[in-house]
Image: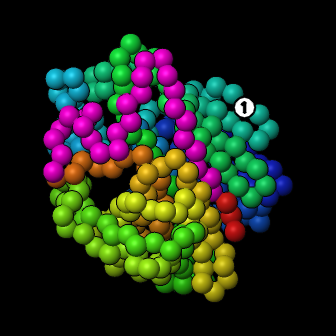
Amino acid sequence: MLLQLTNNKLYIEIDSLGAQLMSLRDLVGTEYLWQGDEKYWKGRSPILFPVVGSLRNKKTIIDGKEYTIPQHGFARINEFKLKKKLTDSAVYSFSSNQETKKSYPFDFELEVTYTISDFSLIVSFKVMNKDNKSMPFGIGAHPAFNIPILSDENFEDYKIQFEKIENCDSPVVDQKCATIISKERVVALEDTNSINLKHEMFYKDALVLENLKSRSVSMNSIETGRGIQMDFHGFDYFGIWQAPDAPFVCLEPWTSTATLDVEDDNLRHKRGIIELSPGKSKEFCYKITII
């Protein structure tokens, strides 16, 4: 079921399936969010939980037992309940059930809040451990943005710019199994804060940025300055992805990544995994602003 929120500057739509953002428009009607196309990628802005990326053979070990978890987890393919709706915000909730426990043996609740303010959309995740044991998890966002935004622009007219000068490389993603080859790396940013977009950047899959100093990034037209800004405090990893030659780019704040080739399959051992104590909760937030 779709729900709309709007103010005098911004309009969004949210689907209860996966609590996925489906539209992000200004009031002139310009659509900033990719609208999905199976030719390239049918997603728009899936929520990644309880894992980010792929596990080795989609398998993991939790407390001595093997489980299967699909790529990017299962939150994105489950129905969320609308918990609360106000004029400028909506809160969705998804809780563990018999099906989720077949692949992830924990009692949890995932709460997702969308809030619009001026030209900004704030997306908040709240993970609650309702079990009597520590709960390992990763969480992330996967929003795709139309690039170019306007039909008379070119993809190469756009750049990604971080708030600080960076020196950052990216491990290569194994395209056969979507895990990470830790020792094979490409330079992403070298004494710069800017990346000029080119389709060939993504022919080896996503850029997986580690050790960024920046917690804010923009993606906009070099000619007009028009685009979006994303603030992503609280996320240690940042993915940039595009299906080959597609007219969109994903900006993805993550707490963890796909399995590394040097890691074992124990979920509690994964790089960046968060261990949430029984009865505790943890919140994460990112913001998209139209510029």
Circle 1 packing at 10 Å, graded few (<14), some (14-19), many (20+), is some
Relative to 10, is 219 on the left or the right?
left
Queried whether the magenta region covers residue 144, the answer comes back as no
Can the viewer see residue 56 in this picture?
A: yes
Quadrant of residue 62 in the image? top left
Quadrant of residue 201 in the image? bottom left
Q: Give the range drawn in magenta.
A: 262-288
User: Which of 61/262 is in front?
Assistant: 262
Q: Relative to residue 109, is residue 287 depicted above or below?
A: below
Q: Relative to residue 270, is residue 24 depicted above or below?
A: below
Q: Position of residue 102 (x, y in %)?
A: 28, 22
Q: Which residue lies furthest to the top in this view?
A: 132
Can the viewer see residue 245 in this picture?
A: no
Q: Look at the numbered disc 1 and give the secondary structure of its residue.
A: strand
Dividing the image into 4 quarters, which one contains the C terminus? bottom right
Quadrant of residue 182 in the image? bottom left
- Who's the residue at 73% across and 48% down the image? 116
- Who's the residue at 43% across and 41% down the image? 139
Q: Residue furthest right?
A: 8
Q: Where is residue 131 in the image (x, y as percent from the top left)?
A: 40, 15
- Who's the residue at 37% across and 74% down the image? 188
Residue carrying label 1:
85
User: Which of 157/285 is in front?
Assistant: 285
